[in-house]
Amino acid sequence: MNKKMSLLMFSGDYDKALAALILANSAKEMDIDVTIFFAFWGLLLLREPHHMTTEDKSNYEKMFAMMTPKGPDDLPLSKMNFSGIGKKMLLEMMKDDEAPELIDFLNGARKKGVNFFGCKLSMEIMGFKKEELIPEVKVVTAQDYIKDALASDIQLFI
Amino acid sequence: MNKKMSLLMFSGDYDKALAALILANSAKEMDIDVTIFFAFWGLLLLREPHHMTTEDKSNYEKMFAMMTPKGPDDLPLSKMNFSGIGKKMLLEMMKDDEAPELIDFLNGARKKGVNFFGCKLSMEIMGFKKEELIPEVKVVTAQDYIKDALASDIQLFI
Amino acid sequence: MNKKMSLLMFSGDYDKALAALILANSAKEMDIDVTIFFAFWGLLLLREPHHMTTEDKSNYEKMFAMMTPKGPDDLPLSKMNFSGIGKKMLLEMMKDDEAPELIDFLNGARKKGVNFFGCKLSMEIMGFKKEELIPEVKVVTAQDYIKDALASDIQLFI
């Protein structure tokens, strides 16, 4: 039976998402099963900018949807973001080394069959509908996450 | 024998504390034993505002006690806090969904028998006395935490 | 066979580095093997200020090297840094309790034989050369980290 890695993606930072998805892609290449449970700010990584809707949303939820990053390219850095200048610098440095961008690692993880779990409670609170997120997302509870994490050999909170 | 989850609560953010306590409550409902080791900023979550004392404290410790959040309700968000406006917005969104607040999850964890460990070294450095924290807290060393984490099936640093 | 702890040090904050190195030192005193994998901002902790070079660096990499902390003493706090005032306060409080500083815990970890892994991809992107970091660092890939983490009893992302 394959080994298994479980990541809880809480953060909505570009650099932390990069770390999580590099780990996820690397693990899949080693035939390790990977689940990422996206909760709170982590959900922002899964938004599809062209699938945004205001239907069935409270005013707070609409405002929240507008004020928060609209998907992977829009996420800030956890450090040295400097209103985007630090992030631009990091992206240039990544380009110089021909390192893939966050969106490439995200698409790699989707192709390689990483399990994408979305936290039900977070989605309800933030007002995100399933159809606003990438289609691979399976909406699950915290208990579903815990069950999956218990069956894993590596668990990280990112 | 029950499965076991060990959380190291380092952060003093409202949203991260919410994540930790939702996990703790969910796990206890699944008959999983839970220990949370509160270190550094995580200790702020355990303060009882009406139990503050200045006795036996250095000037730095008194200043620190005044400048830091006075308990769960007082914690800021890790993102988008905007001097409290972002947090107010999140709280309104939680209320709209009838989601319990942080204090409710904390009280739930206390009632369900989560083990509350407080980091001895952090308490000494920050100048927090045992009687300033909720009574369930057991003061332990980093080695006690490690022993407990080694016996756990899930370990997360939050 | 010894138990084993694996830390992924992503953050470049003084307080989080302190937490990681206190855990590492405590574990080694309990005869637990410890590996710390330094990635992204975590690498800043391993810089040797007097070993900086601008050779073979792009302009972005030179700028990045100048703008970022030059080693353990230079790291900011994750919270309440207040342009260094909060950190000064924490350091004074640590001194009052005769608690060792970050650099002492780092040197302790080096003496006790903690394994220092540096993330190859992060080093390439940020432009850090092996000789700019402490000599114990072994440069490895994300897959090497995962292999080591799979063989560990505790894994934390800090």
Image: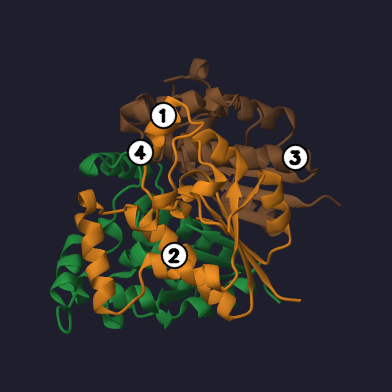
Chain colours: A orange, B brown, C green
Q: Give the Cα distance between marks 3 and 2.
A: 30 Å
Q: Give the Cα distance between marks 4 and 2.
A: 26 Å
Q: Chain of mark 2?
A: A
Q: Quadrant of residue C153?
A: bottom right
Q: x and y percent of residue C113 in the render?
A: 50, 75
- What amino acid type should be assigned to the residue bearing mark 3? Lys
Q: Which disc, if any, is residue B87? A: 1
Q: Are marks 4 and 3 in contact (CB under 8 Å)?
A: no
Q: Which residue is mark 3?
A: B28
Dot 1 and dot 4 within a common chain: no
- What amino acid type should be assigned to the residue bearing mark 1? Lys
Q: Report if residue A24 is visible in the image.
A: no
Q: Is residue C22 above or below residue B28?
A: below
The tag earlier along the polypeptide, 1 or 3, is 3
Q: Are marks 3 and 2 in contact (CB under 8 Å)?
A: no
Q: Quadrant of residue B19?
A: top right
The tag earlier along the polypeptide, 4 or 2, is 2
- Residue at x 37%, y 32% (from the top left corner): A63
**In what element is the residue under mark 2?**
helix
Q: Chain of mark 3?
A: B
